[in-house]
Amino acid sequence: MAASNVVHLPTPQEAEEAKITSRALSKYAHNERLHLKIASNSAESDDLILPGYAINLLLDILTEMSKGNAITVMPIHAELSTQETAELLNVSRPHLVELLEQGKIPFRKVGTHRRVLAKDVFDYKQRIDEDRLKALDELAAQAQELGMGYE
Protein backbone atom coordinates (compact mmCIF):
# COMPACT_ATOMS: atom_id res chain seq x y z
CA MET A 1 0.00 0.00 0.00
CA ALA A 2 0.99 3.62 -0.07
CA ALA A 3 2.42 3.70 3.46
CA SER A 4 4.55 0.59 3.35
CA ASN A 5 4.53 -2.65 1.40
CA VAL A 6 6.10 -4.56 4.28
CA VAL A 7 3.61 -6.69 6.22
CA HIS A 8 4.68 -7.47 9.74
CA LEU A 9 2.63 -9.96 11.72
CA PRO A 10 3.15 -9.33 15.43
CA THR A 11 5.17 -11.96 17.23
CA PRO A 12 3.49 -13.62 20.23
CA GLN A 13 5.57 -11.41 22.53
CA GLU A 14 4.57 -8.24 20.63
CA ALA A 15 0.92 -9.32 20.72
CA GLU A 16 1.09 -9.81 24.48
CA GLU A 17 2.83 -6.46 24.98
CA ALA A 18 0.19 -4.79 22.79
CA LYS A 19 -2.57 -6.39 24.88
CA ILE A 20 -1.07 -5.12 28.14
CA THR A 21 -0.48 -1.65 26.72
CA SER A 22 -3.96 -1.40 25.18
CA ARG A 23 -5.55 -2.30 28.51
CA ALA A 24 -3.58 0.43 30.27
CA LEU A 25 -4.28 2.99 27.52
CA SER A 26 -8.00 2.18 27.35
CA LYS A 27 -8.52 3.92 30.70
CA TYR A 28 -7.66 7.20 28.96
CA ALA A 29 -9.57 6.67 25.71
CA HIS A 30 -12.17 9.36 26.47
CA ASN A 31 -9.66 12.12 27.20
CA GLU A 32 -9.34 15.08 24.84
CA ARG A 33 -5.57 14.84 25.16
CA LEU A 34 -3.11 12.75 27.06
CA HIS A 35 0.23 13.80 28.53
CA LEU A 36 2.77 10.96 28.33
CA LYS A 37 6.31 10.64 29.57
CA ILE A 38 8.34 8.14 27.58
CA ALA A 39 11.74 6.80 28.48
CA SER A 40 14.21 4.53 26.74
CA ASN A 41 16.79 2.15 28.16
CA SER A 42 19.45 4.81 27.61
CA ALA A 43 17.88 7.10 30.27
CA GLU A 44 16.66 9.44 27.55
CA SER A 45 13.10 10.67 28.07
CA ASP A 46 10.56 13.00 26.51
CA ASP A 47 7.18 14.47 27.37
CA LEU A 48 4.48 14.01 24.75
CA ILE A 49 0.95 15.27 24.33
CA LEU A 50 -1.37 13.06 22.28
CA PRO A 51 -4.66 14.47 20.98
CA GLY A 52 -7.78 12.39 21.69
CA TYR A 53 -8.03 11.08 18.13
CA ALA A 54 -4.43 9.82 18.26
CA ILE A 55 -5.14 8.06 21.57
CA ASN A 56 -8.04 6.16 20.01
CA LEU A 57 -6.09 5.40 16.84
CA LEU A 58 -3.19 4.04 18.89
CA LEU A 59 -5.65 2.01 20.94
CA ASP A 60 -7.16 0.53 17.75
CA ILE A 61 -3.68 -0.37 16.47
CA LEU A 62 -2.69 -2.02 19.76
CA THR A 63 -5.97 -3.94 19.94
CA GLU A 64 -5.47 -5.37 16.44
CA MET A 65 -1.83 -6.20 17.20
CA SER A 66 -2.90 -7.99 20.40
CA LYS A 67 -5.06 -10.24 18.17
CA GLY A 68 -2.02 -11.01 16.01
CA ASN A 69 -3.21 -8.88 13.08
CA ALA A 70 -0.94 -6.86 10.82
CA ILE A 71 -1.78 -3.14 10.56
CA THR A 72 -1.26 -0.63 7.77
CA VAL A 73 -1.60 3.11 8.32
CA MET A 74 -2.41 5.07 5.20
CA PRO A 75 -2.83 8.80 4.67
CA ILE A 76 -6.34 9.60 3.46
CA HIS A 77 -4.93 11.49 0.45
CA ALA A 78 -2.65 8.64 -0.65
CA GLU A 79 -2.93 7.72 -4.31
CA LEU A 80 -3.42 4.02 -4.90
CA SER A 81 -2.89 1.87 -7.96
CA THR A 82 -5.80 -0.16 -9.28
CA GLN A 83 -4.28 -3.32 -7.78
CA GLU A 84 -3.93 -1.72 -4.34
CA THR A 85 -7.49 -0.39 -4.57
CA ALA A 86 -8.86 -3.77 -5.62
CA GLU A 87 -7.09 -5.44 -2.69
CA LEU A 88 -8.47 -2.84 -0.29
CA LEU A 89 -12.02 -3.46 -1.54
CA ASN A 90 -11.46 -7.23 -1.80
CA VAL A 91 -12.53 -7.30 -5.46
CA SER A 92 -10.76 -8.31 -8.65
CA ARG A 93 -8.77 -5.69 -10.52
CA PRO A 94 -10.96 -6.05 -13.68
CA HIS A 95 -14.10 -5.50 -11.56
CA LEU A 96 -12.51 -2.43 -10.00
CA VAL A 97 -11.66 -1.03 -13.44
CA GLU A 98 -15.35 -1.46 -14.37
CA LEU A 99 -16.35 0.49 -11.24
CA LEU A 100 -13.91 3.25 -12.15
CA GLU A 101 -15.09 3.45 -15.76
CA GLN A 102 -18.75 3.53 -14.59
CA GLY A 103 -17.88 6.58 -12.48
CA LYS A 104 -18.66 4.87 -9.17
CA ILE A 105 -15.22 5.77 -7.80
CA PRO A 106 -13.35 8.89 -8.96
CA PHE A 107 -9.87 8.41 -10.42
CA ARG A 108 -7.29 10.17 -12.50
CA LYS A 109 -4.98 8.89 -15.18
CA VAL A 110 -1.22 9.17 -15.03
CA GLY A 111 -0.22 8.18 -18.54
CA THR A 112 -2.07 4.90 -19.04
CA HIS A 113 -2.31 4.14 -15.31
CA ARG A 114 -5.32 4.90 -13.16
CA ARG A 115 -4.79 6.39 -9.68
CA VAL A 116 -7.43 6.45 -6.96
CA LEU A 117 -7.40 8.52 -3.77
CA ALA A 118 -7.70 6.44 -0.61
CA LYS A 119 -10.40 8.88 0.58
CA ASP A 120 -12.53 8.07 -2.47
CA VAL A 121 -12.10 4.33 -1.87
CA PHE A 122 -13.21 4.67 1.76
CA ASP A 123 -16.16 6.87 0.72
CA TYR A 124 -17.24 4.24 -1.83
CA LYS A 125 -16.87 1.45 0.71
CA GLN A 126 -19.00 3.37 3.21
CA ARG A 127 -21.71 3.94 0.55
CA ILE A 128 -21.90 0.28 -0.45
CA ASP A 129 -21.88 -0.84 3.19
CA GLU A 130 -24.81 1.51 3.89
CA ASP A 131 -26.64 0.20 0.80
CA ARG A 132 -26.12 -3.40 1.96
CA LEU A 133 -27.46 -2.65 5.44
CA LYS A 134 -30.50 -0.90 3.95
CA ALA A 135 -31.18 -3.91 1.69
CA LEU A 136 -30.85 -6.30 4.63
CA ASP A 137 -33.26 -4.19 6.69
CA GLU A 138 -35.77 -4.24 3.82
CA LEU A 139 -35.44 -8.04 3.45
CA ALA A 140 -35.91 -8.53 7.18
CA ALA A 141 -39.03 -6.31 7.12
CA GLN A 142 -40.45 -8.30 4.19
CA ALA A 143 -39.73 -11.58 5.98
CA GLN A 144 -41.59 -10.31 9.05
CA GLU A 145 -44.57 -9.21 6.93
CA LEU A 146 -44.70 -12.65 5.32
CA GLY A 147 -44.47 -14.37 8.71
CA MET A 148 -41.29 -16.26 7.88
CA GLY A 149 -40.29 -16.66 11.53
CA TYR A 150 -37.92 -13.70 11.84
CA GLU A 151 -38.62 -11.46 14.80
Image (spheres, helix red, strand yellow):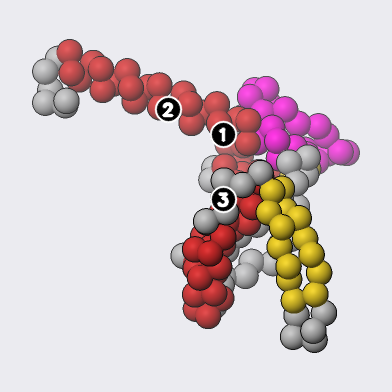
Q: For the residue labelled by badge 1, is the local secondary structure a helix, a strand or a loop?
A: helix
- Residue ID for mark 2: 132
Residue 21 in view (yes/no): yes
Mark sitting earlier along the chain (1/2)? 1
- Residue ID for mark 1: 125
- Residue ID for mark 3: 29
Q: Residues within 10 Å of mark 2 (few under 14, many from 20)?
A: few
* Quadrant of the snapshot with the C terminus: top left
Q: Amino acid at mark 1?
A: Lys
Q: For the residue labelled by badge 3, is the local secondary structure a helix, a strand or a loop?
A: loop
Residue at x-position 79% and y-position 64%? 47
* Image coordinates for residue 110, horizontal then vertical, percent: 86, 38
Q: Say if the magenta span includes residue 40.
A: no
Looking at the rendered structure, which numbered label has been put on residue 5?
A: none
Q: Do the CB atoms of the residues marked 2 and 3 lie less than 8 Å apart?
A: no
Q: Amino acid at mark 2?
A: Arg
Q: CA distance from mark 1 to mark 2?
A: 11 Å
Residue at x-position 76% and y-position 31%? 107
Task: Please provide the residue range marked out in magenta.
Answer: 98-121
* Image coordinates for residue 24, horizontal then vertical, percent: 53, 64
Nearer to the camera, 47 or 105: 47
Mark sitting earlier along the chain (2/3)? 3
Nearer to the camera, 102 or 137: 137
